[in-house]
């Protein structure tokens, strides 16, 4: 047998079973996962052969879409309440829900020296706009209001707040300069364990309700091996290493 043909057959034999069993999972992921999900999806595909097709958005909107029949198979929420509600309503597979990470909140400005350790920018009269995610549908937005209330400055800042539909849009308001600062997910401004741009204050966890982020196998994904494989992969050291590098804890 010619050497090239033999080598080709060996490659096919090695990859054929994996390719034959590969499937795609439709994932609804909270907007704070935008950066880490790129690495996680790539690692997932390399490890399993399966592919993750990821839609990013607010957890509250995903809840409404799932209830209206959206064909998502896995939900990676920004809270633990929404997956629990969907599971209770019979829209998720019972027993599949778990906390895949705990998020962190950061007050961030794209400009250097705007946010300092003493938080003078919050305690002084407001100058410029502050972006937050819509607290009605985005857990990170609700957490931001809790922080402002705990610091006693919520009433001062309320007229200066601009709301993004989700934490991704809130981040864009700040990154583009349309807001001077904003409460964003730490994962949006941290990479490899550091914050390379602007100025930031990482909010201590005790200043707001824990941002426990739960995963749930939704009913449309019950018989999809790729959906179950993704949930398993999220528990792996490889996935947790990625999430940890973006500021998540476990």
Image: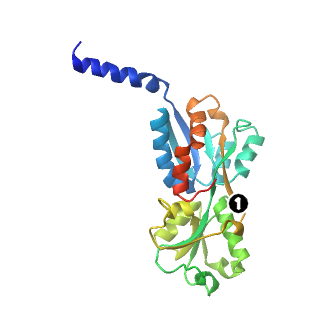
Residue sitting at x 58%, y 82%: 121
Task: Where is residue 83? Give x, y as percent.
Answer: 70, 46
Dot 1 corresponds to which residue? 210
Residue found farthest to the front: 237
Q: Count residues near mark 1 (Cα–Cα under 10 Å), then give few for <14, some for 14-19, many for 20+.
A: some
Q: Is residue 176 left or right of residue 223?
A: left
Q: Is residue 201 left or right of residue 98?
A: left
Q: Is residue 230 above or below residue 83?
A: above
- Viewer-side residue, 14 vs 22: 14
Residue found farthest to the top: 1
Colour scheme shown? rainbow
Q: Is residue 139 above or below residue 86?
A: below
Task: Where is residue 235? Give x, y as percent.
Answer: 60, 42
Residue found farthest to the right: 88
Q: Is residue 152 above or below residue 239?
A: below
Residue sitting at x 62%, y 56%: 249
């Amino acid at each position: 047998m010619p050497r090239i043909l033999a080598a080709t057959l060996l490659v096919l034999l090695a990859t054929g079973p994996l390719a034959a069993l590969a499937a795609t999972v439709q994932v609804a992921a909270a907007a704070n996962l935008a950066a880490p999900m790129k690495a996680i999806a790539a690692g997932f595909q390399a490890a399993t052969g399966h592919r993750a097709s990821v839609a990013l958005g607010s957890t509250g909107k995903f809840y409404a879409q799932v209830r209206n029949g959206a064909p998502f198979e896995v939900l990676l929420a920004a809270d633990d309440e929404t997956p629990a509600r969907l599971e209770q309503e019979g829209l998720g597979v019972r027993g599949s829900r778990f906390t895949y990470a705990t998020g962190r909140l950061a007050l961030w400005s794209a400009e250097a020296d705007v946010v300092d350790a003493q938080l003078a920018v919050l305690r002084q009269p407001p100058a410029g706009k502050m972006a937050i995610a819509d607290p009605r549908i985005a857990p990170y937005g609700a957490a931001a209001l809790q922080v402002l209330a705990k610091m006693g400055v919520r009433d001062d800042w309320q007229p200066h707040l601009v709301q993004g539909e989700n934490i991704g849009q809130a981040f864009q308001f700040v990154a583009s300069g349309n807001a001077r600062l904003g409460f964003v997910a730490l994962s949006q401004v941290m990479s490899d364990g550091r914050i390379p741009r602007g100025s930031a204050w990482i909010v201590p966890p005790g200043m707001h309700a824990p941002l426990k982020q739960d995963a749930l196998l939704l009913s449309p994904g019950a018989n999809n091996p790729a959906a179950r494989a993704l949930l398993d992969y999220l528990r792996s050291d490889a996935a947790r290493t990625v999430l940890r590098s973006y500021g998540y804890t476990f």
